[in-house]
Image (spheres, helix red, strand yellow):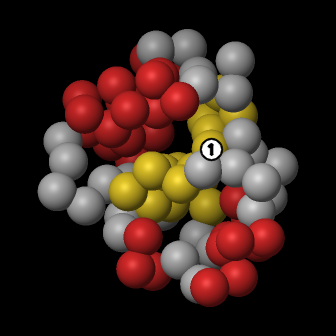
Amino acid sequence: MAKIAVETPLEDVKQALEEKGHDVFMFTNEEEAKGANLAVVRTLNEIDADAEQFDFPFVSMEGASVDEIVADVEHKD
């Protein structure tokens, strides 16, 4: 299963993904997200231009429910 980084303060997303059996950890900046296979962020606008250096996708929480984010993550996993 993928290692998923979830941006602080999205604790509800982290908990929902853990309940589905995912390996999840919280991060506060892009550097801390390294090592993940996928990252859930509040909005893609907050990701620096440097985010292109990462070899994993980002999922934006903006405008989505926790259930929608979990479904999106599982689709990409």
| 52 over 58 or under it: above or below | below
Please tell me which residue is depicted at 33% across the width and 38% down the height of the picture.
69
- Give the total of numbered labels: 1
State which quadrant residue 62 falls in. bottom left
Left or right of 41 on screen, residue 4:
right
Does 76 appear above or below 51?
above
Q: Nearer the viewer, residue 42 or 15?
A: 42
- Quarter holding the N terminus is top right
Whether residue 5 is visible here, answered yes or no, is: no
In percent of width and height, residue 57 lies at 60, 50
**As shown in the figure, which amino acid type bears the numbered disc 1?**
Leu
Q: Position of residue 19 (x, y in %)?
A: 44, 17
Judged left or right of residue 20, residue 4 is right
**Residue at image point 62% right, 44% down:** 38
Element under label 1?
strand
Q: Is residue 37 left or right of residue 20?
A: right
The structure residue drawn at horizontal position 46% and vertical position 32%, both measured from the top left corner, is 73
Q: Residue furthest bottom?
A: 49
When the figure is inspected, residue 40 is found, relative to residue 4, above or below; the finding is below
Q: Position of residue 67 (x, y in %)?
A: 24, 29
Residue 45 in picture, x, y percent from top left: 40, 80
Q: Quadrant of residue 72?
A: top left
User: Is any atom of residue 4 visible in this view?
Assistant: yes
Residue at the extreme front: 52
Q: Which residue does the numbered mark 1 point to in the structure image?
A: 38
Quarter of the image for the C terminus: give it: top right
Q: Nearer the viewer, residue 76 or 41?
A: 76
Mark 1 Cα-neighbour bin, 10 Å: few <14, some 14–19, many ≥20: many
The residue drawn where x is 36% and y is 64% is 42
